[in-house]
Image: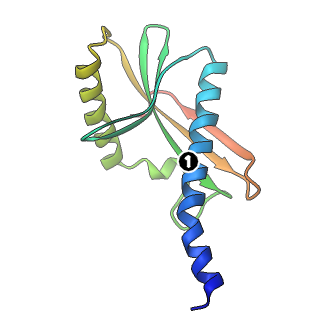
Amino acid sequence: MDSSSSKRRLARPDLRKATGRAAEEAAARHLERRGYGIVARNWRCRTGELDLIATDGDVLVIAEVRSRRGGASRFGTAIEAVTPRKCAQVRSTAQVYLAQSRRETNKVRFDVIAITFTPEGGIEELKHLEGAF
């Protein structure tokens, strides 16, 4: 293995993190443009992480953000990355958030925001699925 292939492999996690950060930023801007209030980003606890927590009127919205670069990959599309297991984990983490934050709300909605980036890093597609799970 030459050093250039080693460097490429080491750079991939950084590219994934940068893509994830860019997707979360684009998703937050999208929600704000639609009149949502951003309550928290990347809220963490022992059960997991909530990408975006927002308000849409009197509804608390938990948004799971998924991204892919360059369309469908061997790992599937961004929307396909939201598996039943991931939905259960987000719901569990949301319960912890609600208990800890003591938010007064009867309405909680789980959305998915799926973003596909061009190879150059621009947004090719942004899909916002309200009440996705």
Residue at the (51%, 47%) spot, across then down: 79
Q: Is residue 127 above or below residue 73?
A: above
The quadrant holding residue 14 is bottom right
Q: Position of residue 87 (x, y in %)?
A: 34, 41
Say which residue appears at 43% left-offset and 47% top-offset: 82
Q: Nearer the viewer, residue 80 or 92?
A: 92
Q: Is residue 34 above or below residue 41?
A: above
Q: Residue at x 64, y 27 (%)?
A: 29
> Which residue in the rendered view is the most extreme toward the front?
3
Quadrant location of the N terminus?
A: bottom right
- Residue beneath the point at 47% across and 15% down: 55
Where in the figure is residue 30, as x and y percent of width and height?
64, 27
Furthest residue in direction bottom, as rendered: 1
For residue 74, above or below residue 113: below
Crowding at dot 1, Cα within 10 Å, few <14 / some 14-19 / many 20+, comes out as some
Image x and y of residue 46, in percent: 24, 41
In this view of the protein, which residue sits in the foreground, 90 or 8? 8
Q: What is the image's colouring?
A: rainbow
| Residue assigned mark 1 | 20
Question: In this rendering, would 100 be left or right of 65?
Answer: left
**In the rendered picture of this protein, how many numbered marks are placed on residues?**
1
Q: Amino acid at mark 1?
A: Gly
User: Residue 58 sits in which quadrant?
Assistant: top left
> Element at badge 1?
helix
Q: Quadrant of residue 73?
A: bottom right
Image-based side of 38 in relation to 106, left or right: right
Q: Specify the quadrant that holds the C terminus.
A: top left
Viewer-closest of 114 and 38:
38
Q: Position of residue 59 (x, y in %)?
A: 42, 13
